[in-house]
């Protein structure tokens, strides 16, 4: 059985990726899981300067999911290169760095600094951030801003660009095509959904920032639909993300057209979740007498 894949020119030992923001910098999970068995680790969002994140409470469990408003807490690109990459170089899996900024120049600064750092396989662009130079409009909610940002970074990047789309749009296919037109090498579909929760006893929001990002199994049917739509509308690979907790969930995404998948929220309660998904995927392929994940990608049968 051959689980290796090629994603945007990157050779991965398997298509299971630990999602950004749920797996720290990899080192936090080393004592629980053998990182050498994971296809890739996508580290938490990295910005031009350190960010402390939002005040608590910033996590709240929901039925079959979770609300979070971490506020993109991270050590900043300089400390990431200095303090985090030495471990990641020895981790034995591909390293994807999630990149974000609040204006175009901040994205450029992060990418250009990362360009000088060895052993990074790809950049994943988080475009779900408000553009402070355009009145707070979120990059990923505007096809034109998406196209422009991706194009600018593609010209400066030494590595493949994966663009992580926001689901909080009217037509995600339009954004997928805009990212592809800008030069994206692959898409991650999708980021979290905007949601909220209220405490009926105190009348206060459960999250300090009132709203937060909804993730987990509750969103899987919606992101699965988005992956299906995007994979049929662009020529670049699509990575499926949203509510994957077991191999069968991953198989759904592959059948819908995903070339690889990311495991996110499940990492919060099961630090071995990516490995459990991988092991289940191996059993599934063996049961179906298939030799590769590629044998099921996009193979959804019509009624």
Image (tube, helix red, strand yellow):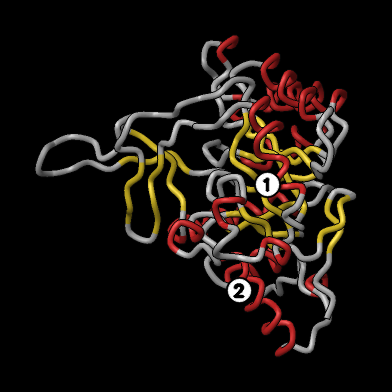
43 to 156, vertically: above or below = below
Q: Is residue 215 left or right of residue 279?
A: left
- Residue 20 appears at what percent x and percent y? 60, 45
173 to 65, vertically: above or below = above
- Residue 30 appears at what percent x and percent y? 60, 58
Q: What SS does tag 2 mark?
A: helix
Query: Which residue appears at 62% of the width and 69% of the height?
Result: 275
Identify the disc placed on residue 214: none
* Residue with the mark numbered 1: 188
Q: Quadrant of the C terminus?
A: bottom right
Q: Are marks 2 and 1 in contact (CB under 8 Å)?
A: no
- Residue 154 appears at what percent x and percent y? 84, 28
Query: Which residue appears at 75% of the width and 41% of the height?
Result: 162
Q: Residues within 10 Å of mark 2 (few under 14, many from 20)?
A: some
Q: Quadrant of the N terminus?
A: bottom right
24 or 239, nearer to the observer: 24
Q: CA distance from mark 2 to mark 1?
A: 19 Å
80 or 201, nearer to the observer: 80
* Residue 152, image quadrant: top right
Q: What SS does tag 1 mark?
A: strand
291 or 55, nearer to the observer: 55
Q: Residues within 10 Å of mark 1 (few under 14, many from 20)?
A: many
Identify the disc placed on residue 247: 2
Q: Is residue 88 left or right of residue 5?
A: left
Q: Is residue 35 left or right of residue 115?
A: left
* Residue 105, image quadrant: top right
């Amino acid at each position: 059985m051959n689980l290796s894949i090629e994603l945007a020119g990157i050779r991965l030992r398997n298509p299971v990726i630990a999602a950004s923001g749920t797996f720290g910098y990899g080192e936090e999970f080393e004592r629980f899981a053998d990182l050498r068995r994971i296809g890739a680790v996508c580290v938490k969002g990295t910005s031009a300067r350190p960010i402390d994140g939002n005040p608590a409470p910033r996590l709240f469990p929901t039925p079959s999911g979770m609300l979070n408003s971490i506020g993109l807490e991270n050590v900043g690109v300089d400390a990431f290169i200095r303090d985090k990459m030495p471990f990641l170089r020895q981790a034995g899996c591909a390293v994807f760095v999630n990149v974000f900024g609040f204006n175009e120049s901040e994205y450029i600064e992060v990418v250009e600094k990362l360009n000088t750092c060895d052993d990074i396989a790809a950049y994943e662009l988080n475009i779900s951030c408000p553009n402070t130079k355009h009145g707070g409009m979120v990059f990923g909610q505007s096809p034109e801003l998406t196209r422009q940002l991706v194009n600018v970074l593609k010209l400066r990047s030494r590595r493949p660009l994966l663009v992580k789309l926001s689901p909080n749009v009217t037509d995600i296919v339009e954004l997928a095509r805009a990212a592809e037109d800008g030069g994206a090498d692959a898409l991650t579909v999708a980021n979290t959904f905007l949601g909220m929760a209220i405490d009926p006893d105190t009348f206060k929001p459960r999250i300090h920032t009132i709203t937060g990002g909804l993730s987990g199994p509750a969103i899987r049917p919606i992101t699965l639909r988005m992956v299906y739509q995007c994979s049929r509308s662009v020529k670049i690979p699509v990575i499926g993300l949203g509510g994957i907790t077991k191999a069968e969930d991953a198989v759904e995404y592959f059948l819908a057209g995903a070339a690889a998948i990311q495991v996110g929220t499940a990492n919060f309660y099961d630090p071995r979740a990516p490995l459990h998904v991988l092991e289940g995927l191996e059993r599934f392929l063996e049961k179906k007498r298939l030799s590769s994940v590629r044998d099921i990608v996009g193979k959804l049968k019509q009624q």
